[in-house]
Image: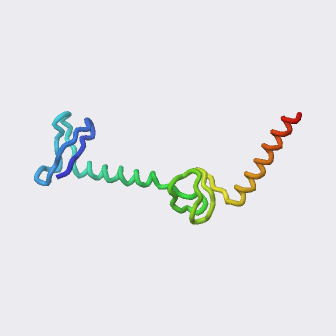
Amino acid sequence: MIIVKCPDCGRKIIWDDFQPTTIKCPDCGREFDVKEALRENIKKREEGLQARVFRCPHCNAILDRAWFIKCSNCGYWVFGSFSISSKVLFIGTVILGYLLLSWYFFHLMH
């Protein structure tokens, strides 16, 4: 027994092996093929699984999430579709911190 959902109205219909493969929805009257509905269901599931896979832009390794994560394969930090090495990220953070601190003291003293 399989529960099939009508593509038009969304009603769930129970189908077993003794029924024909083309069934009619009791609510809206639409006839549809059970095998085709199952193929569509499998296709949607496969697309959903592929949509949730995040990859490193540098080495194409699979990641848990797409933002603020360090790739275990190449060691680069991933920010969405952008990746940067740890050394460059550290140096950039130090320079940015120095500039912000200098700007703050310059405006405080002036």
Residue drawn at (50%, 56%) of the image: 64
Q: Tell me if 16 is positioned left or right of 44 in this view.
A: left
Task: Name the spot of residue 61 as percent of width and height, x first.
Answer: 54, 62
Q: Tell me if 2 is positioned left or right of 67 in this view.
A: left
Rendering quarter of residue 12: top left
* Visual colour scheme: rainbow
**As drawn, 63 above or below 36:** below
The residue sitting at the left extreme is: 18
Residue drawn at (10%, 53%) of the image: 18
Front-most of residues 56 and 102: 102
Q: Tell me if 104 is positioned left or right of 8 in this view.
A: right
The residue sitting at the bottom extreme is: 73
Task: Name the spot of residue 19 as percent of width and height, x first.
Answer: 12, 50
Residue drawn at (20%, 34%) of the image: 28
Rendering quarter of residue 72: bottom right
Residue drawn at (26%, 38%) of the image: 10
